[in-house]
Image (cartoon, rainbow, N blue to C red):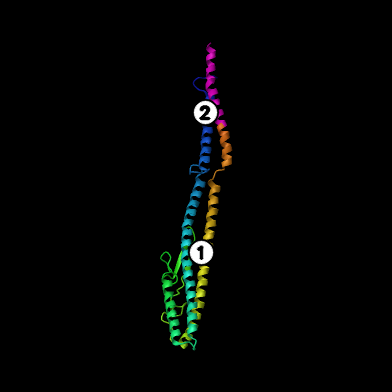
Amino acid sequence: MSSINTNVGAMVALQNLNRTSSELSSTQSRISTGLKVASAKDDGAAYAIAQSQRATVSSLDAVKDSLSRGVSVVDVSMSAGESVSDMLTQLKEKALAASDTSLDTTSREALKADFDSIRGQITKTLSNSTFNGVNLVDGTNAEIGALANADGSSTITVTGEDLSLGGAVVTLASDDSFDTATSANALLSTLDDSISNVSAALARLGTSSKALDNHMTFVGKLQDSITSGIGNLVDADLAKESAKLQALQTKQQLGVQALSIANQSTSTVLSLFR
């Protein structure tokens, strides 16, 4: 039946054209954004998972910052410890030279002045070994903690090493010195113990610094893996979408022609009245 009120062919052609236009719009959006899931409307489940993982990646940036600060604090502490170790070695040299009984008084007094000056420098070095307000070598901070995961439930703790004079590590007291060969010789054992203790403290700090470095490397790799996983969920295959775009553009042109033909079909009714 031919009808000028209801053109079924035109209706079907229009539906197909609208569907093609919708697909074309989606494809163009994927190509322009590079995403097959750009919003929750595209795929609610995938979008929710991707957003959760994006939050994790962002949180891991804060973890890396925390670990980096921890590494810097420990590195500054290690530099101070190495300086203290060097100065203790110099003190031992001065004390050993002063223990020589053949040394005259003037020379021993010069060695004593050098000894006292270097000993005082140890305290100054420790007090200035601060990074971001944290000092692990002068007894101010017993330990620091760096974030280890994205939700803050885990931390990496670094224990401080108090290298202050007269402490458990540097047993040389702040007023220890010598006036005679005998008193100079008596300091040698204390200095040997202090040097050994500082070396052990430096080894512990070095282990902590390595642990922070290793974990920061792991966090970086973890971020890369999560970012790759997000890409697998939401990234568009641009080669595939480009090929699809060409096909849809051709299909749209054919749809327009089909609709035009369908709209012209009712004009044949006029020939019946001639």
Residue 40: percent from left, percent from top: 48, 44
Callout 2: SS: helix
Label pair 2/1, CB-CB below 8 angstroms: no
Which of these two is toward me, 117 or 79?
Answer: 117
Residue at image point 48% right, 49% down:
51
Residue 49: percent from left, percent from top: 51, 49
Disc 1 marks which residue? 212
Q: Do we see residue 153 in this rendering?
A: no
Magenta stretch bounds? 250-274
Residue 27: percent from left, percent from top: 53, 38
Numbered disc in front, either 2 or 1? 1
Q: Mark on residue 14? A: 2
Q: Mark 2 or mark 1, which has the lower sequence index?
A: 2
Q: Do we see residue 91 in this rendering?
A: yes
Q: In which quadrant of the rendered image does the N terminus lie?
A: top right
| Residue 265 included in the magenta stretch of the image | yes
| Tag 1: amino acid | Leu
Vertical order, 249 against 158 (above or below): above
Residue at image point 52% right, 69% down:
206
Q: CA distance from mark 2 to mark 1?
A: 64 Å
| Residue 267 included in the magenta stretch of the image | yes
Residue at image point 53% right, 51% down:
227
Residue at image point 51% right, 64% down:
212
How would you rate the neighbour count of disc 1 (Cα within 10 Å): few for under 14, some for 14-19, many for 20 or more? many
Vertical order, 169 against 131 (above or below): below
